[in-house]
Image (spheres, helix red, strand yellow):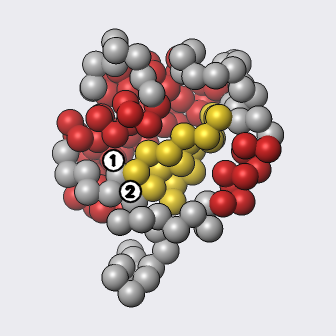
Amino acid sequence: MTLDPRPLGPALAAAEEAGWTTLRVDLAGVRGKAELMRRWGAALRVPSWFGGNWDALADALIDLSWLPQAPGRLLVVTSWRSYAGARPADWETLQEILEEAVDFWRDGGAGELTVLLAEPPAGPDRPADRT
């Protein structure tokens, strides 16, 4: 599946123009926690110490020291609805971790972290989400 970049284009362009680091996590096809952690690890470009569990993800999101210095970071999560629907408890945990990371960076981190949840647009091979 290919994500049509047009809906995300303005947000990504504005972030990049402001000197922010932009990161994308595509959750298309993710069925379990292990694959979820692999996707997050790859998207965040985490160091080898990343443990692939909730605590490690939370720690990584409030560290990010291995990324280039930037006034902020835009983290775009795409194709998340199917995972959220199939694994609601895990999705709730992930949302809590993301909210805590955003709060951390807003309240005292060096820079800002913004998380954008996005879905690919409906098309002929992808029906509109009616939830």
Q: Quadrant of the C terminus?
A: bottom left
Discs 1, 2 touching: Cβ within 8 Å: yes
- Residue 16 at what x, y percent from top left? 73, 43
The answer to which image quadrant residue 84 occupies is: bottom left
Callout 2 amino acid: Trp
Per the image, the residue denoted by label 2 is 80
Give the SS element for disc 2: loop
- Residue 115 at what x, y percent from top left? 57, 44
The answer to which image quadrant residue 111 occupies is: top right
Q: Quadrant of the N terminus?
A: bottom left
- Residue 51 at what x, y percent from top left? 28, 19
* Mark 1 vs mark 2, CA separation in Å: 9 Å
Dot 1 or dot 2: first in sequence order is: 2
Residues 62 and 4: in front is 4
Give the SS element for disc 1: helix
Q: Which mark is residue 91?
A: 1
**Camera sees residue 53:** yes
